[in-house]
Image: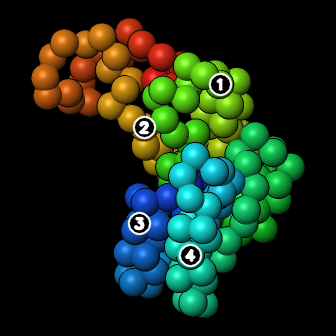
Amino acid sequence: MARIFITGSAGFIGFHLARLLLKEGHTVAGFDGMTDYYDVRLKQRRHQMLLQNERFSASEAMLEDEPRLAGAVESFAPDVIVHLAAQAGVRYSLENPRAYIDSNIVGTFNVMEMARRQGVGHLLMASTSSVYGANEEMPFTEREKADTPLTIYAA
């Protein structure tokens, strides 16, 4: 079974992915910044539920905190990193673009750099349909152009 490191493990998708992977017998380390874009208590409850499984461990820190991220990745030594974490919210990106640069750009760079440094065999990154921006083709597919973002959230 694989050792899988999940960023955004207390979010909706991260939580459900971690549960599924644990059910399949994998060992999972979760990493989440517990930002308050929505109720932090819900995120904490999700981690508490996952921590009932002895094959789950959790770290709470921001992706842009490179030393904390590096420590978590290095100590876990994952086979796979699943990068789901991001500062959420299209509208909020217009109010506070710096939060998106820090989390979504600097944080993603840090995740990719950790994967490279640690020789992680596979890195899976999820994104948002907002990357398709002004693209008028519907429905979106992964083959569509993503070169016209409308907000920093999509960039």
For the residues labelled 1 and 2, the Cα–Cα distance comes to 19 Å
> Between marks 3 and 2, how big is the CA–CA gap?
15 Å
- The x, y position of residue 17, in whole percent, is 41, 66
Q: Are marks 3 and 2 in contact (CB under 8 Å)?
A: no
Kind of residue at disc 4: Arg
**Residue with the mark numbered 2:** 127
Is residue 150 visible from the viewing direction of this image?
yes
> Dot 3 corresponds to which residue?
17
Which label sits in the foreground, 1 or 3?
1
| Nearer-the-camera pick, 137 or 3 | 137
Is residue 106 visible in the rendered structure shown here?
no
Q: Foreground: 124 or 18? A: 18
N-term-proximal mark, 1 vs 4: 4
Q: Residue at x 60, y 22 (%)?
A: 95
Name which of mark 1 and mark 3 comes first in the sequence.
3
Q: Which residue is mark 1?
A: 96
Badge 2 element: loop
Q: Nearer the viewer, residue 42 or 155?
A: 42
Q: Which is nearer the N-term, disc 4 or disc 2?
A: 4
Q: Which residue is mark 4?
A: 45
Residue drawn at the location 60% of the way across and 33% of the way down: 104
In the image, is residue 135 above or below residue 8?
above
Q: Amino acid at mark 3?
A: Leu
Q: Nearer the viewer, mark 4 or mark 3?
A: 4
Q: Height in image: 15 above or below 123?
A: below
Residue drawn 61% across and 61% down?
A: 40
Dot 3 lies on which element? helix
Q: Position of residue 54 (x, y in %)?
A: 60, 90
Q: Is residue 40 above or below residue 36?
A: below
Q: Is residue 106 left or right of residue 95?
A: right
Mark 1–mark 3 Cα distance, whole angstroms, equals 29 Å
Residue 148 location (% of width, % of height):
38, 9
